[in-house]
Amino acid sequence: MSRFSRRNFLAGAGALAALCTVPGSAQKTVSGSRLRSPFRIAVITDEISQDFDHACAIAANEFGMEWVEIRGLWDKNVLKLTAAEIAKAKRILNNYHLRVTDIASPLFKVDWPGAPISKFGPKRDLFNADFTFKEQAEVLEKSIELAKAFDTDRVRGFDFWRLDGPAPHRKAINAKLAEAAETLGKHGLIFLLENEFDCNSGTGAEAAETLAAVQSPHLMLNWDPGNAAARGEVPYPDGYRLLPKNRIGHCHCKDAFPNAKKDGVDWAPVGKGTIDWVGQFQALRQSGYGFAVSLETHWRGAGTPEESTRQSWAGMKSALQKAGALA
């Protein structure tokens, strides 16, 4: 049985609507100055901690951010939060004066039906998201409810686990992306397609082809240079040069360097890998980009997620300053 049974889903949505009207705590816990940037500087909270209050405290008080991206809270994927947990998360956000960049949904991070099972899917960390293809319509519906609850106009998604031979399925995959984008568009929302290295649009070149094929105004790119690097592309300037700049609606920031002993890359703190983040930030600023630049640490070399993210944020902050994108 689907984990989103119709009865439970509608009951949860009704409870959510009621609970989200509960006022936040009157005690404001923000300290220090906030960042000034043409971008919405953010961090994915579970890269710091699964304790959402603690992660928000670090983002607001230590990092000086006004934005966060939500994917996993309290060891649960955001789509699995109860109405009470969503209301609690909203109170925490209110306490720290934080806004949500997007719902980092696992939409379409599944195998494409009728194609050979992808060799990439089973190995991936799904961030507590184990939904099936048959559940994707409900994943989309729940993502829409979450976007409205958290007052964001963006939902992140993918284009299915990577196929060795996607050509016979690409037209149907694009049609599914277009359908989801239109559904989101009817609610005033944007579908952010992430170039995920283990999905079918892994690089800037592949993402550009997908965007060209799906001309929906409701489909934009979550540009992730780290993921492009993991697919063997030089993300900036090579991959970025191919992208339609007016369709970049979100950007993930992490760093990496090639590992000659294996396919792909090893993650690194921002500024310590091979990605030209200063150049990338400069290019985004010059293009007039004004949406999120969100830290997705991935690297865990400092021992804990929090300390690893702290060190990665230091490198990201330095790159933003050098690019003239952070006052």
Image (cartoon, grey):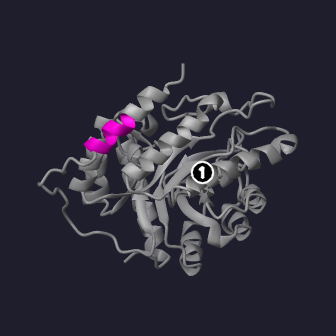
User: Image check: 169 left or right of 214?
Assistant: right
Q: Quadrant of the N terminus?
A: top right
Dominant SS in magenta: helix
Q: Residue at x 54, y 74 (%)?
A: 289
Residue 163 part of the magenta-drawn span = no
Q: Is residue 132 visible?
A: yes
Image coords of residue 217 (percent x, y): 64, 64
**Which residue is at the front of the view, 214 or 137?**
137
Residue 16 part of the magenta-drawn span = yes
Q: Label 1: state its secondary structure.
A: helix
Image coords of residue 248 (percent x, y): 60, 65
**Residue positioned most to the top:** 1
Mark 1 surroundings: few (<14), some (14-19) or many (≥20) residues within 10 A? some
Q: Residue at x 50, y 76 (%)?
A: 323
Q: Is residue 298 above or below residue 312?
A: above
Q: Residue at x 29, y 48 (%)?
A: 90
Q: Quadrant of the C terminus?
A: bottom left
Q: Amino acid at mark 1?
A: Thr
User: Image check: 327 left or right of 279?
Assistant: left
Q: How many marks?
A: 1
For disc 1, the marked residue is 183
User: Image check: 36 left or right of 106?
Assistant: left
**Residue positioned most to the right:** 168
Q: Is residue 50 visible?
A: no
Image coords of residue 27 (percent x, y): 11, 54
Q: Is residue 103 above or below residue 139?
A: below
Q: Is residue 119 above or below residue 55?
A: above
Q: Residue at x 21, y 66 (%)?
A: 32
Which stretch appears magenta? 12-19
Image coords of residue 277 (percent x, y): 55, 66
**Which residue is at the front of the view, 48 or 96?**
96
**Which residue is at the front of the view, 213 or 74?**
213
